[in-house]
Image (cartoon, rainbow, N blue to C red):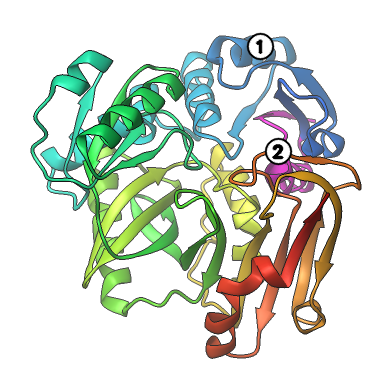
Amino acid sequence: MKTILIAGGGYADIPMIRAAKRLGYRVITSGNRPEELGHRHSDLYEPGDFSDGEAMLAIARRHGVAAVCSCCNDFSALSCAYVAERLGLPGHDPYQTALTIHHKDRYRAFALANGVTTPRAVSFDREAAALAATLPFAFPVLVKPVDLTGGKGIGRADSPADYASAVGRAFAASRAKRVVVEEFIVGTRHGWSAFLRDGKVVFAFADNEHYHLNPYLVSAASTPAAVPATTLDALTRQAERIAGLWGLRQGIFHVQYILRGDEPVIIEICRRPPGDLYVTLVEHATGVDYPSWIVRSATGDPCPDIAPAAVRGHYVRHCVMGFKPGRIHGVQVDPTVEELIVDRMMWWRPGDAFADVHLAKAGIVFLRFPTEAAMTATTPRLQELIRVETL
């Protein structure tokens, strides 16, 4: 039996772990946290920092793995590209390409040099230089660590005083000690998850993004996306052009963008599974086996059978979050919402600490609504309707 290393093991990685086992692989998971839920589903947990390429390389060599697959984290995607390059394994981009895709300063420079519609940005590798700089665009601006996701370390600055604080926080958060400062784009926020074959988009899924207390952490995604067909066509053209420039042949190509008028402004691109069970949302909404596609691609499988699939209803993936820190007493689900839930993964236990309500999650639920109007009206209220009670 061939062995695959999935460089992670969180709850969001469970679909890929299960898919790899269905495909006949012995699955090893890794990471610094043995209590993560995904390790319960693998064949073996090997402790190791999945952001450390050398640590993942050592595990891969020790077990003679036939393939590596990223978890839902950019650091893991970079480690897997590194391991695959060192061992000559298929299914991954060259390491330098992966760095350009997943580090915000390198991506912004690439996008601006190649006419990809993205926020104007400048990057800094020294805090003093960032503070002394005259920015080429007006406030407000966003300051971001180049190497973090999920809204970590991001700050909005509306004034010079805000800017100084945001720069300090971003540099403190960044492992690489580099930040980007970019213009603030006004518009609606969305995701677009495509699959490439031979550099062409053969499947695409579109969503609307929703936010809770943290304006930079997606707390829910709904589909179908409330965007015109021309927007999706433009994203396909951009994705295929970028794929050509980077030499991307196959695999996931996931985009976050802001729709400014009728123009999609691409904020981020990643080549690894999106987090918080997004792949399960794609499964429910379209019926495709998205996690298996991701794993097959990571193993070098040519995936000739992948084809377009339309959304078959009105679906929401909702992260259950709270309003007040404390210890969880319970989660109350409104009866009108309970009947709409088609799937859920809840991991909270009575007494669990809910320290940071901007980040902490008690679980994830998937809902199917009867109409687009019902979905649109209810989704912004889901944190109230599925309410975390803390003491």
Magenta span includes 9: yes
* Foreground pick, 362 / 109: 362
Mark 1 neighbour class, 10 Å CA radius: few under 14, some 14 to 19, many 20 or more: few
In the rendered structure, which amino acid carries the disc numbered 2? Ala
For label 1, the residue is 61
> In the rendering, at what x and y percent does residue 186 appear?
26, 61
Q: Are marks 1 and 2 in contact (CB under 8 Å)?
A: no
For the record, the magenta segment spans 1-25
Residue nearest the viewer, comparing 296 with 135: 135
Name which quarter of the figure residue 206 lies in.
bottom left
Among the 4 quarters of the image, the one containing residue 126: top left
The alpha-carbon separation of the residues under discs 1 and 2 comes to 39 Å
Q: Which secondary structure, mark 1?
A: helix
Q: Is residue 140 left or right of residue 190?
A: left
Label 1 vs 2, first from the N-terminus: 1
Specify the quadrant of the image occupied by residue 367: bottom right
Q: Is residue 19 magenta?
A: yes
| Number of the label disc, if any, that sits on residue 355 | 2
